[in-house]
Image (cartoon, rainbow, N blue to C red):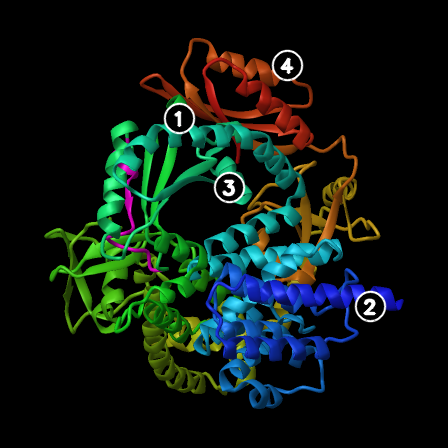
């Protein structure tokens, strides 16, 4: 590298540093700037000569992470310094955590240590589940919330600069991001970052879908701007006359959320009516915020008719993430539904910056511990989650990340927040573990209801308890929250272990009578004979007498005659019919190839997503069932690609004109004369499509139905669906 290029790069690094100080969300004191400068100098020195895969100097990465932490999340100088040096210990053997503590103090060292632990986990070559890494990462919430926040910023910059990585690495990182980092960002209240992570994840997992929606949003931006201007012109006169200081702007829906709505509702891009929301942000003192929000609500609804069931008051009852706003859906210009979000400047900053902004606005003497409450809830989830399976751990943890909220009352009038779809039993456990474990009944609004009845916002809930009540296995079906399920499992496991200990002694005595010693070998034989999973299951069943004396005698008899049984089976066994299997395998070999060498391997199509030729797919190497093929947008794809990346195999369709695939499409719309005949005619007129099953029903002029058919590929399916959708009366056509 010539001297000129070195100077250019050094100037660029210095420019980034100056911009970091300039865009800081917090007001930086002289001591803050000194701390940040010290961290910057160390980052430059420690990463000297190191380069990213793209070729740029590595130090640009920690500076970029620090800028995200500073401007987009709004954290303090301590966090900015930690972000600048978050990779120093990991990437440079000359520096240890003790060195960081001596240079920057205990707090910065603790954060850097937490980030270093996470980095070591994510770079581990051990083929244990990636979920185990996530589990350990989540446990760092016990150390300092800033560890996770800086890690989210680190992941965001990695996603923004991932273009130079290999495709398989891109898919793995994008899957991890959608699987855990985006939900974490959502739960911490970092909505802007959450949306960007989701969009970037979609960009690498489904590039065609991402590019299509992105280009359509660009095309419709002019129309959106004009729509906002119409609303502004309508409201500005009245808002100005009330001497309100405000701005009105549009917030486009993220590409990822538009795609999700298209899939969920079975609609096209043009049919997603709420592609953007209108946001009214007003200036106000803390004292008048609520009053002015409702005044603006009144003005908006004077001009535009509101949808009464779409009012969301998160000012009176903020979300557990700290989010506050009034959301209303109104009939706007051109008779289109549009969501209007009303926020003060403080509320808007909290919505965009998360908890960092929340603490900026805390008054002296305030004892608002909402962050502490949230952390306590998360820590409780971790402590109570005794699952040895890391995937189960992460899935249960995620239950609490994206859950919407409902608000219910205790008998004394105290307001409690619960996840949407929470049951009366979940409420009992949210009050206290002992109350949950002793629940014998629940009254909602004065009426006795089942333990699995789902609660609604505004319900008043009373728990009836009894010391004689104990949880049973059915309770796991009654509860929906991770907290309640974990408490119930823990109670059931304790009871099971107690009975298993008694069962082991009973089994020892009974086997002794049968002249069999209870040892590791005989236990394994018993587990296999009774088709159980563990010795604990065996002892437990003996303890509750579901494995009794006659069953044990059968085991003893089969054990002594095992050789004779084996010989009899060999003599009487019928020859296998292999011709059909071979024929099926040959056909399958003609459809998909795997890996970079495009090998022809035996596989099965996964039933969870029913892939057909033309769908984007990947292979997953199962433990007992060979290669299973899944669609990229399979409900299980993110979990598989995140947790088992080492078992993912690239898959590619090749010509297979002889193979038929079964698909099911749902159709709904307005019932018209001859509609079913028209639908079947469209299908019959398309070559290579064969109907197997037809089911339609009508109700008061509306019809719905499903058709099971055989097609050659995804192209045939799309072609048929497009033709059906053009028929008069058909509203929705969706493949399931």
In this rendering, position of residue 624 left or right of residue 182: right
Q: CA distance from mark 2 to mark 3?
A: 46 Å
Point out residue 211 in the picture as x, y percentages from the top left corner.
65, 39
The residue that label 2 is drawn on is 6
Say whether marks 3 and 4 touch (CB < 8 Å): no
- Whether residue 622 is visible to the viewer of this picture, yes or no, is no
For residue 376, which quarter of the picture? Answer: bottom left
Q: Earlier in the sequence, mark 4 or mark 1?
A: 1
Number of the front mark, 4 or 1: 1
Mark 4 nearby-residue class (10 Å; few <14, some 14–19, many ≥20): few
Range drawn in magenta: 306-320
Q: Is residue 470 above or below residue 161?
A: below
User: Which tag, 2 or 1, sits closer to the chain's start?
Assistant: 2
Task: Answer whether residue 319 is magenta in the image.
Answer: yes
Regarding residue 603, the answer to whether it shows in the image is yes
Query: Which secondary structure lies at badge 2?
Result: helix
Front position among marks 3 and 4: 3
The x, y position of residue 447, in whole percent, is: 11, 51
Residue at (39% x, 26% y) in the render = 336
Counting residues from the start of the chain, the first of labels 2 and 3 encountered is 2
Q: Residues within 10 Å of mark 1 (few under 14, many from 20)?
A: few
Mark 3 nearby-residue class (10 Å; few <14, some 14–19, many ≥20): few
Cα separation, mark 2 vs mark 1, equals 56 Å
Image point 48% across, 69% down: which residue? Answer: 530
The residue indicated by pointer 3 is 260
Work out how far the residue at label 3 is from the one at label 4, CA to CA, in angstroms.
Answer: 32 Å
Q: CA distance from mark 3 to mark 1?
A: 21 Å
Q: Nearer the viewer, residue 674 or 1?
A: 1
Q: Which residue is mark 1?
A: 336
Of 362 and 220, nearer the camera is 362
């Amino acid at each position: 590298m010539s001297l000129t290029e070195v100077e250019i790069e050094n100037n660029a690094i210095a420019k980034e540093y100056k911009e970091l100080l300039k865009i800081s969300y917090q007001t930086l004191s002289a001591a803050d700037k000194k701390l940040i400068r010290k961290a910057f100098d160390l980052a430059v020195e420690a990463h000297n000569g190191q380069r990213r895969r793209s070729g740029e100097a590595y130090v640009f990465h920690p500076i970029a992470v620090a800028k995200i932490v500073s401007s987009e999340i709004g954290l303090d100088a301590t966090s900015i310094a930690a972000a600048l040096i978050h990779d120093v210990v990991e990437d440079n053997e000359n520096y240890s955590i003790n060195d960081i503590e001596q240079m920057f103090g205990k707090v910065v060292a603790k954060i850097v240590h937490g980030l270093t632990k996470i980095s070591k986990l994510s770079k581990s070559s051990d083929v244990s589940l990636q979920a185990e890494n996530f589990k350990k990462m989540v446990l760092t919430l016990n150390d300092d919330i800033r560890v996770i926040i800086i890690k989210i910023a680190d992941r965001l910059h990695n996603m923004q600069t991932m273009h130079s990585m290999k495709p398989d690495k891109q898919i793995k990182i994008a899957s991890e991001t959608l699987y855990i980092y985006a939900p974490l960002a959502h739960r911490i209240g970092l909505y802007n970052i959450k949306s960007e992570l989701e969009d970037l994840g979609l960009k690498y997992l489904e590039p065609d879908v991402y590019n299509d929606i992105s280009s359509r949003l660009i095309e419709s931006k002019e129309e959106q701007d004009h729509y906002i201007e119409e609303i502004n012109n309508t409201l500005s006169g009245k808002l100005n006359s009330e001497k309100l200081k405000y701005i009105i702007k549009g917030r486009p829906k993220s590409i990822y959320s538009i795609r999700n709505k298209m899939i969920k509702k079975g609609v096209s891009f043009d049919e997603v009516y709420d592609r953007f929301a209108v946001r009214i942000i007003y200036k106000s003192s803390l004292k008048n915020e609520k009053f002015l929000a409702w005044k603006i609500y009144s003005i908006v609804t004077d001009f535009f008719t509101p949808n009464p069931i779409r009012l969301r008051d998160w000012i009176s009852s903020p979300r557990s993430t700290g989010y506050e706003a009034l959301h209303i859906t109104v009939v706007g210009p051109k008779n289109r539904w549009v969501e209007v979000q009303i926020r003060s400047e403080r509320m808007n900053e909290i919505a965009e910056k998360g908890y960092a902004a929340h603490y900026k606005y805390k008054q002296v003497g305030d004892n608002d511990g909402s962050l502490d409450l949230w952390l306590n809830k998360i820590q409780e989830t971790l402590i109570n989650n005794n699952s040895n399976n890391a995937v189960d751990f992460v899935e249960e943890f995620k239950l609490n990340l994206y859950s919407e909220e409902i608000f219910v009352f205790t008998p004394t009038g105290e307001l409690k927040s619960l996840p949407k779809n929470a049951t009366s039993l979940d409420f009992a456990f949210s009050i206290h573990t002992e109350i949950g474990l002793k629940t014998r009944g629940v009254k909602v609004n004065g009426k006795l209801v089942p333990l699995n009845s789902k609660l609604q916002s505004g319900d008043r809930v009373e728990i009836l308890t009894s010391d004689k009540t104990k949880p049973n296995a059915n309770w796991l079906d009654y509860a929906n929250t991770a907290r309640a399920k974990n408490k119930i499992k823990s109670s059931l496991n304790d009871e099971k272990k107690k009975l298993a200990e008694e069962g082991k002694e009973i089994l020892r005595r009974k086997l002794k009578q049968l002249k069999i010693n209870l040892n590791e070998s005989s236990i394994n034989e018993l587990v296999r004979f009774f088709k159980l999973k563990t010795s604990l299951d065996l002892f437990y069943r003996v303890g509750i007498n579901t494995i009794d004396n006659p069953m044990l005698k059968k085991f003893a008899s089969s054990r002594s005659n095992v050789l004779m049984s084996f010989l009899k089976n060999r003599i009487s066994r019928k020859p296998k019919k292999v011709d059909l299997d071979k024929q099926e395998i040959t056909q399958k070999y003609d459809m998909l190839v795997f890996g970079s060498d495009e090998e022809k391997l035996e596989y099965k199509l996964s039933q969870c997503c029913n892939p057909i030729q033309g769908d984007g797919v990947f292979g997953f190497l199962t433990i007992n069932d060979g290669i299973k093929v899944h669609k990229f947008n399979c409900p299980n794809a993110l979990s598989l690609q995140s947790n088992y990346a080492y078992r993912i195999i690239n898959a590619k369709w090749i010509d297979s004109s002889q193979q038929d695939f079964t698909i099911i499409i749902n159709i709904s719309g307005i019932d018209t004369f001859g509609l079913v005949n028209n639908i079947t005619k469209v299908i019959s007129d398309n070559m290579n499509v064969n109907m197997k099953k037809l089911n339609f029903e009508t109700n008061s002029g509306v019809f719905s139905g499903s058709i099971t058919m055989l097609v050659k590929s995804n192209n045939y399916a799309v072609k048929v669906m497009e033709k059906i959708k053009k028929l008069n009366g058909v509203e929705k056509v969706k493949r399931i």
